Image: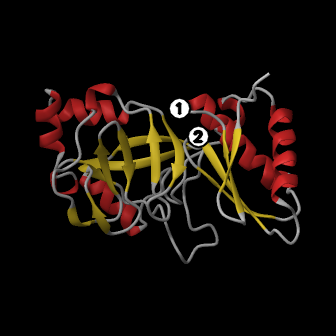
Amino acid sequence: MKEAFRFLPAGERAVVVECGDAIDPAVNDKVVALAASLTAKPIPGVLESVVSYRSLLVMFDPMRVGGWGLRRRLARRLRSLGAVGPAETLSRTVDIPVCYGGAFGPDLPDVAAHTGLSIEEVAHRHSAVAYRVYMIGFMPGFPYLGGLDDALVTPRLPTPRALIPAGSVGIGGNQTGVYPLDSPGGWRLIGRSPLRLYDAGSDNPVLLSAGDGVRFVPVTAEEYARIERGEWRGPYAKGVSV
């Protein structure tokens, strides 16, 4: 029987565990579950693991565990996981307040024009979906979210911006995400969140993790300012609503 996973070498100190060939929630469930298993029950010699859409990069110390021995142990671990579903991997849902449009979302009118929807309908559809964090990448804390409404799919900007403010919420093709830091970028900006998705001075610097659920909650510009100033006493006071 052919295994539903395969191993690929990544130099002398890492191996890639591929759990499927498609960007699919069931495949990502398996990847997230394997990463969680390695945290809960570490394999001696494994240093770190990094989740992607359909694979897990496992870094190891070759002085403590051999590559082939590690593959055998990972294979046994995968087989022991059995069928994994969202109940095991979507451990929490994080509410992210977003002020849509205006100076916070300069590309919202362009997305509306491209999709044939009104500005209000774009914001409504974007905030009506329960998203899944497939992976963190591109920069510290940047979440690649799955679940964007097909009606909102919009091409990236033809020329990326040199600077995008931290907290900006964008659409790039069939993906959506939040820029955790000031950075260049080419996604269409439709809003901004006052939450800090990355805080280098915190004990837990990254707000979101692969396997989390995300909901975008529309807020007014006044509410945005109160959350940003720390005057808000609602569910975003500490940045996370579980």
Relative side of 6 to 241, left or right: right
- Disc 2 marks a residue whose amino acid type is Arg
The residue located at (53%, 32%) in the rendering is 22
Q: Residue furthest bottom?
A: 201
- Disc 1 marks a residue whose amino acid type is Ala
Q: Residues within 10 Å of mark 2 (few under 14, many from 20)?
A: many
Relative side of 108 to 24, left or right: left
Helix, strand or loop at label 1? It is loop
Image quarter hosting the C terminus? top right
Is disc 2 in contact with disc 1, using a CB cutoff of under 8 Å?
Answer: yes
Q: CA distance from mark 2 to mark 1?
A: 7 Å
Between residue 165 and residue 195, name the one nearer to us.
165
Image quarter hosting the N terminus? top right
Give the x, y percent position of residue 21.
56, 33
Relative side of 238 to 116, left or right: right
Between residue 110 and residue 216, name the one nearer to us.
110
The residue located at (59%, 48%) in the rendering is 210
Whether 20 is drawn above or below 170: the answer is above
Q: Earlier in the sequence, mark 2 or mark 1?
A: 1
Residue of label 2 = 54
Q: Which mark is residue 22?
A: 1
The residue located at (64%, 72%) in the rendering is 203
Give the x, y percent position of residue 123.
26, 37
The residue located at (37%, 59%) in the rendering is 179
